[in-house]
Amino acid sequence: VQPLVCGLVLLVTLAACRKEKADDQAPSVSFLLPGDGAEVTIKLDPRFPDFEAIGRGAKIVRQGGLVIFPTETVYGIAANADNARALVRLREVKRRSEDKPFTVMISKKDDLLKQSPCRTPVLFKLVDAYWPGPLTVVVPDRVQGKTLGFRIPNQRVALALVREAGCPVAAPSANISE
């Protein structure tokens, strides 16, 4: 994929083409606690999510644990993108190689300014038009200058989890990468 400007690459997922889960199918959120590997699963009503449960999941992400949660298209695994140990654990769980970066979810457009030095006007026009939603922008990251994909989810549970976590959230799909 050829960058447009400032290393900006756009990826649009199928999220815009898919319907939300049926109202009677409550998605579940699984919390994988840091350290001991204990697991807790909570069913959530997609129309009226339990924000206390989402807050528990967000705290686990902040502390370095993993949380499996629903997104617009698939279930994802959330990890604190600023926590090296959490990212190592996420790579182990996913069986994902070090050279394949994770998409990072953020909760507001201003967070992109903290994550990337890219300040191209076209970037801001695009995120203003398509976020929250199925747009992933691939831009240089703030630390190593490598590129990372960022997006703001347009799904209540996912957005609430990222917002409450208060950190950038690495969020690959919950399948094995092999």
Image (cartoon, rainbow, N blue to C red):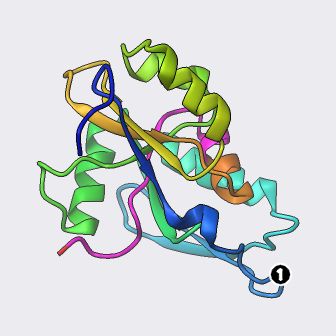
In the image, residue 80 sits, relative to residue 18, either above or below, namely: above
**Residue 145: % across, % down:** 21, 21
> If the image is split into quadrants, where does the C terminus sit?
bottom left
Residue 51 visible in this rendered orientation of the protein: yes
Is most of the magenta stretch helix, strand or loop? loop
Between 165 and 26, the one lying in front of the other is 26
Residue picked out by circle 1:
23
> Is 74 situated left or right of 65 in this image?
right
**Residue 147: % across, % down:** 25, 33
Q: Is residue 117 magenta-colored?
A: no
Between 13 and 61, the one lying in front of the other is 13
> Is 33 situated left or right of 106 in this image?
left
**Residue 25: % across, % down:** 75, 86
> Is 121 situated left or right of 96 in this image?
right
Q: Amino acid at mark 1?
A: Asp
Between 120 and 83, the one lying in front of the other is 120
In the image, residue 25 sits, relative to residue 136, either above or below, namely: below
- Give, as a single range, the part of the protein colored magenta: 162-177
Q: Is residue 163 magenta-colored?
A: yes
